[in-house]
Amino acid sequence: MNIGTIRKTIGVILCIEAAFMLPPLLLALADGDAAALRGFAAAIAAVLVVGVPCGLIKSKGRPLGARDGFVTVALAWIIISLFGAIPFYASGTIDSVSDAVFETISGFSTTGATIIDDVEAAPRAILLWRSITNWIGGMGVLVFLLAIAPVAREGGSMFLLRAEFPGPMASKLVPRMQKSAKLLYEIYISMTVVQIVLLLLGGIPLFDSVNISLSTVSTGGFCVRNDSMASYGAYAQNVTLVFMTLCSMSFSLFYCVLALEFLRIRRSRELRAFVIVVLGVALLMGIDTASKFASVADGVHHTLFQVVSIISTTCYVSIDASFWSPFVWAMLTVLMITGPMSGSTGGGMKLSRVMILCKSTYRAIARTVTPNSVHLIHL
């Protein structure tokens, strides 16, 4: 196993994590929040003490193999989660170490579960750090590493991408791995910035706009209000709906748009399945709850928002969760497990895996009925 390169990679990742802690540190300084300032200062110091020596280690120059890639990814996520919990605990926002680690892992994994009862009472710097952990986890810190400072050769970089990729298969957008990673993050950052601007144009405060955007494009779901998105109004919810939908799609589709390869988008069966599932479930939800809404437009808005929010695993809510019937929640639970398209920032199994599972089931049944027939699975 290539211990030297693995250690160097993790060291660089820790230094990147320290850089991401700087915005919350500056916000704590601007707010005059001594506790949050102390927490982030301690966290940055701890991360750099470990990360800088590891990052400066000279590796033997051997590329990472498949096993090295999986070990690097697993260790990196564990280590950044442990160090990322320091601000929560050192600032006194969360009293328990285990709870602080839980909050951090929930952020980096874009799960969106929280143990903070009243997020509106939490320091703004801490809330920003929660959203940043979502944003880092959405695309993956290792993809960011490959984009700005690849520490392995091209072959080793591909193994890191395969271990990090949110889907059944990983491929480059362009021949060089580093350029592929840069393209992914350019799209990711552009979507974040555009959503921030659109929310600001709708009168949403800057702090709220930044946090909502960071958690939306990552499909993480951390929010700065206790009622999630319910109190923001229709404009902010519609903007968020659009970006939740976009981030539920494979980022390779956005590259196809930029490269004017629209035929590849038309041939995407997973995209077709995604649209059918979203519209189909929304229609069933609309029929089940039609009498509860004041107007058809209101029903379409809240129904689509909730379906996309759940299938993308963002899990924002635009209305009280008790509003929906058990039948609706049963469908939403299935969507949460299924998840969005592969190559997106969402969680779940991914639609491509579900499609492969359905095709494999059909092939097994067909072979039982006609043993000599040949059935190929194509996606």
Image (tube, rainbow, N blue to C red):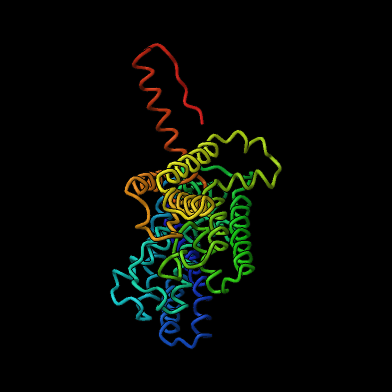
Q: Is residue 361 visible?
A: yes
Q: Of residues 225 and 194, which is closer to you in this image?
A: 225
223 sits left or right of 179 in the view? left
- Seen at 59% across and 49% down, the residue is 177
- How many numbered marks does the figure carry? 0
Name the residue located 42 percent from the left edge and 49 percent from the top edge.
291
Q: Front-most of 58 and 192?
A: 192
**Percent x, y for residue 81?**
39, 65
Across and down, in percent, residue 153 comes to: 56, 51
Q: Judge whether 340 appears above or below 96 on screen.
A: above
- The x and y percentages for residue 10 are 45, 62
Residue at horizontal 47%, vertical 46%?
Answer: 340
Viewer can see residue 151:
no
At x 66% / y 35%, what residue is drawn? 263
Q: Position of residue 152 (x, y in %)?
A: 53, 54
Please, is residue 169 above or below residue 113 in the view? above
